[in-house]
Amino acid sequence: MTMPSPATPDAVPLRASRETGRAPVSVSFEFFPPKTPEMEKTLWASIARLAPLSPAFVSVTYGAGGSTRERTHATVERIARETDLHPAAHLTCVAASRDEIDDVVRAYKAAGVKHIVALRGDPVSGVGTHYEPHPQGYAYASDLVAGIKRIGDFEVSVSAYPEKHPESASLDADIDYLKAKVDAGATRAITQFFFENDVYFRYLDKVRAKGIDIPILPGLLPVTNFKQASNFATRTGASVPAWLLKRFEGLDDDPETRKLIAAAVAAEQVTDLVDRGVTDIHFYTLNRADLVYAICHLLGLRPKPEAVPQAVAV
């Protein structure tokens, strides 16, 4: 497959004075490693579609218990090898010794990958069960961040939870965990998705009050499938407002109208964030490009004509 090679100038944000009245916006995208050949085609078609927007980085997730370790590594290496995108590899503490994790980090370094998203990870026994650190492993994300920084001068992103991690005793305690990750060397945080922007801004005020000054990117999940998004929210502790439920009510068997509603909801959330000063946004794409591409277009991101990908051959 031939991928487009988007240099930074290929995506042209519309300047505030020209059209939008806002500062230029930088975006990043999250993908997950494919399980089947058909899913692989979808993933790479989505990457080809979004690459000309020159995202700041693209991240690739890591399955529960390290279950996608090899597929994650292969996907990240292919992005690094075949595109001009800047891949960020997710890495967790779960079900691996320090030596095993360090070997993965060194392999990324050898492949030219300079950005790792360091996470504790979900328990091997599943979300909601008790987490037990590997006896020879990194216990928590802050330990993993420190380990990564010992191996190389990586950019390290970490997670942040505007409505607190489900296992945290309180939001204040959760922010203390974030500070430990920053103190260990984290350079950026990406939030769990949220649907009410005030949740993000209240969280940001609390984070800054604790002296944490790294970028806190809002992570957004465009809702193309409301039931799926609700399930994700239940697992991660994110709240689903009643107004959002009302928007999708009665559309279970009407996918075309759901797409239109999803676009309207996403547009409202994104434009409100940008109007309130946000300049960096991370999208959980679920390996689907169309809605995310449309939102980026709304934000003023434009590929140059020669950067638009042609038919994708896998």
Image (cartoon, helix red, strand yellow):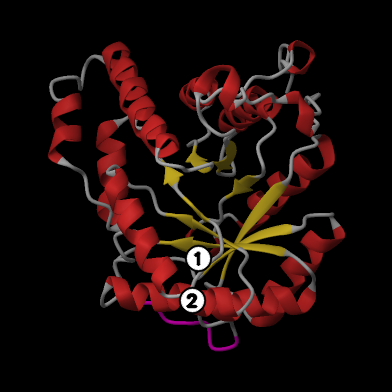
- Tell me: 262 left or right of 87: left
Picture residue at 26% right of the left edge, 33% below the top: 226
Q: Amino acid at mark 1?
A: Gly
Q: Nearer the viewer, mark 2 or mark 1?
A: 2
- 94 or 270, which lies in front? 270
How far across and how far down the image is residue 208, in percent? 43, 67
Which of the 4 quarters of the picture holds residue 297?
A: top right
Q: Are marks 2 and 1 in contact (CB under 8 Å)?
A: no
In the picture, the quarter occupied by the N terminus is top right
The label shown at residue 65 is 1
Q: Is residue 144 above or below residue 90?
A: below
Residue 30 is inside the magenta segment: no
Vertical relation: 239 (above or below) 126: above
Q: What are the residue bounds of the magenta stretch? A: 131-136
The residue carrying mark 2 is 179
Q: Position of residue 235 (x, y in %)?
A: 29, 55
Q: Is residue 82 visible?
A: yes
Residue in the image at 83% along x and 41% along y: 81
- Mark 2 falls on what kind of element? helix
* Residue at 58% in and 79% down: 183
Q: Residue 246 location in percent, x, y?
A: 13, 29
Asked whether residue 125 is in view, the answer is no
Label 1: which secondary element: helix
